[in-house]
Amino acid sequence: MRTAVDSSVLLDVITDDPAFADRSEALLRRASREGSLIVCECVLAEIRPALPEHEVDEFLADWHIQFVPSTRDSALLAGQMYGTYLRRRTRASGRVIPDFLIGAHALLTADRLAARDRGYLRDYFKKLTVVAP
């Protein structure tokens, strides 16, 4: 089982978030026992401000997280879903293109996504299995 990991889960662990760190760590440990963990470039970019550059590779290695770059197909799917979002929205929202890039990457390169989803992933990526901490 291959699990893509969203930055929300990794940042919980990195920052020792009082509300989510324990649950996110437990989710990462469980997913790691069940298979491999992967991240895309958007996730790396989102966690980088929380870690000194020399610690990023160490953190990923400690958790056995592999970097798997996005594909052309995942970028196009993200753009398609983002276009749907732009047409559907009735007011300004916090959704930005990286959210869609991460969702599309997970759908096309993994069996599921570990994320603190507030509903948009399940809404725009209906075939994506999302596991939350």
Image (cartoon, rainbow, N blue to C red):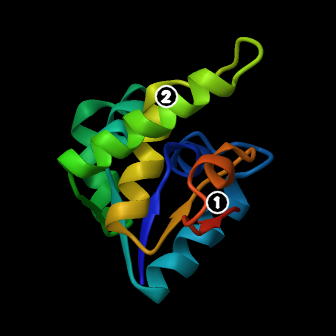
Left or right for 131, reference 111: right
Label annotation for residue 83? 2
- Residue 39 percent across, percent down from the top left: 34, 54
Label annotation for residue 24? 1
- The residue depicted at 58 percent of the width and 44 percent of the height is 8
- Residue 51 percent across, percent down from the top left: 38, 34
Label 2 Cα crowd, 10 Å radius (few <14 / some 14-19 / many 20+): few
* Rendered view: 95 above or below 56: above
Q: Which of marks 1 and 2 is nearer the N terminus?
A: 1
Numbered marks: total: 2
Give the quadrant of residue 108: bottom left
- Residue 49 percent across, percent down from the top left: 40, 25
- Tell me the quarter of the image containing the N terminus: bottom left
21 or 100: nearer the eye? 100
Left or right for 121, reference 76: right
- The residue depicted at 54 percent of the width and 64 percent of the height is 128
* Rendered view: 23 above or below 40: below
Name the amino acid type tagged 1. Answer: Ser
- Tell me the quarter of the image containing the C terminus: bottom right
